[in-house]
Image: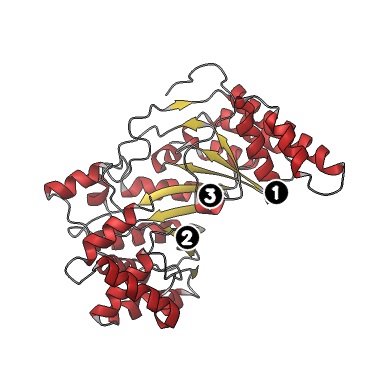
């Protein structure tokens, strides 16, 4: 882990959670310090580095400056003056264009939240993270939430005292990509962490009073470990009781190492029907927790599987059970509709217009019971 180079201007990383769409992005680290997970290709070939605190403060200063300038322009007429804003932006250097655009978009969204990039902000020294958080909140006292991704192993190595300091400085929410808590799966996908460490990290975040999102990835165990993937992950989640459980269905693009395992025959991927069975098994075994389940990703088969445990459990499970009870041709039709972006939820099957569009798509793509799994897998790659 290194600090690299002189300040090159405002930076943006490549990714954020869907729930942070309205947030200001602040890049604390570049890329991923682990970068060995077999299902992920986002940072392959990229070198990890930590940005100096002084550079991050300069990013914050620039955003503050441009927000002040935009607000000054807007106050001149009491309404948005697009020509004046564009004229001001056009006069900026190329290096400041990104900071100005980030400031403009964030101002329009209400300036309520900040997301710290890239893959694992919690890997930096706690005192540096505290300094960054404190500075951001000083310059933007109105913000309601600061959020970050983190690896479980990094969080587990932070003392409770330092986690308390980080929470007090203003980190409100952490997203941890658990994906699976089955040790067999974690070893195979080279996650670099085991089930117990996942539990320790999640409990540490909760003790600090920081909101926690944990991610579950149906299909990550393939056919060999589908039951373990569901049951062991549910068991770990039950011990953590995160604020959010976010569903992220596995897709396998050609660029990831796991694709080579599929080609070699060492990994047998699940089709959508078996992934639905795994998701049902996972949800059915969540007990004694009050987490909110979110299906906030286009790769998920059921957008409607959302709610608060335990009250909404049966309502969340119902569409999965109903899907699994459908006749085979109806299941295929729903898969085609969902993977083409026509359907969002199972009840869309009853919408005459949407159903008609889906039937045309099924015919156009020549999807059958023999090729539906391969076709769906190919379609899912387009959304990564």
- Measured as percent of width and height from the top left, residue 266 is found at 13, 49
Instruction: Check the image and name the residue furthest to the top.
Output: 6
Circle 3 Cα neighbour tier, 10 Å, few/some/many (<14 / 14–19 / ≥20): few
Mark nearer the viewer, 1 or 2: 1
- Measured as percent of width and height from the top left, residue 298 is found at 42, 59
Which residue is labeled 1 in the image? 108
Mark earlier in primary sequence (1, 2): 1
| Mark 1 residue element | helix
- Measured as percent of width and height from the top left, residue 146 is found at 61, 44
Q: Residue at coordinates 44% horizontally, 53% vertically from top-left?
A: 214
Above or below — where is 99 with respect to 323?
above
Q: Quadrant of the N terminus?
A: top left
| Mark 2 residue element | loop
Mark nearer the viewer, 3 or 2: 2
Circle 1 Cα neighbour tier, 10 Å, few/some/many (<14 / 14–19 / ≥20): few
Mark earlier in primary sequence (3, 1): 1
- Near-viewer residue (29 or 351): 351
Left or right: residue 255 versus residue 174 is left
Residue 134 occupies quadrant:
top right
Mark earlier in primary sequence (3, 2): 3
Which residue is labeled 3 in the image? 207
Above or below — where is 275 with respect to 253?
below
- Measured as percent of width and height from the top left, residue 83 is found at 75, 41
């Amino acid at each position: 882990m290194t600090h690299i180079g002189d300040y090159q201007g405002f930076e943006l990383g490549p990714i954020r959670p869907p729930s942070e769409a309205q947030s200001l992005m602040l890049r604390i680290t570049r890329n991923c310090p682990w970068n060995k997970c077999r299902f992920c290709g986002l940072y392959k070939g990229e070198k990890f580095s930590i940005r100096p605190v002084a550079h991050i403060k300069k990013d914050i200063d620039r955003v503050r400056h441009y927000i002040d300038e935009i607000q000054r322009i807007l106050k001149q007429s009491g309404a948005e003056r697009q020509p004046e804003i564009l004229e001001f932006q056009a006069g900026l250097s190329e290096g400041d264009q990104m900071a100005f655009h980030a400031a403009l978009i964030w101002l329009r969204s209400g300036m309520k939240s900040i997301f710290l990039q890239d893959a694992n902000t919690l890997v930096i020294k706690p005192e540096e993270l505290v300094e960054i958080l404190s500075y951001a909140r000083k310059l933007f006292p109105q913000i309601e939430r600061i959020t970050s991704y983190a690896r479980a192993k990094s969080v587990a190595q932070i003392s409770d005292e330092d986690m308390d300091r980080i929470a007090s400085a203003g980190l409100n929410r952490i997203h941890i990509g658990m994906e699976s808590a089955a040790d067999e799966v974690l070893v195979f996908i080279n996650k670099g962490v085991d089930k117990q460490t996942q539990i320790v990290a999640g409990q540490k975040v909760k003790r600090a009073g920081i909101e926690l999102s944990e991610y579950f990835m149906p299909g990550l165990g393939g056919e060999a470990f589908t039951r373990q993937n569901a049951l062991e992950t549910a068991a770990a989640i039950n011990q953590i009781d995160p604020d959010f459980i976010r569903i992220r269905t596995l897709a396998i693009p050609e660029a990831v190492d796991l694709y080579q395992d599929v080609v070699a025959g060492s990994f047998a991927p699940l089709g959508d029907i078996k992934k639905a069975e795994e998701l049902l098994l996972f949800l059915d075994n969540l007990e004694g927790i009050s987490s909110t389940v979110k299906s906030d990703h286009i790769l998920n088969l059921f957008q409607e599987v959302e709610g608060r445990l335990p009250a909404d459990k049966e309502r969340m499970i119902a569409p999965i059970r109903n899907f699994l009870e459908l006749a085979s041709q109806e299941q295929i039709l729903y898969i085609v509709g969902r993977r083409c972006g026509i359907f969002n939820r199972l009840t869309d099957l009853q919408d005459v217009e949407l159903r008609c569009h889906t039937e045309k798509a099924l015919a156009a793509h020549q999807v059958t019971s023999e090729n539906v799994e391969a076709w769906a897998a190919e379609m899912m790659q387009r959304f990564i």
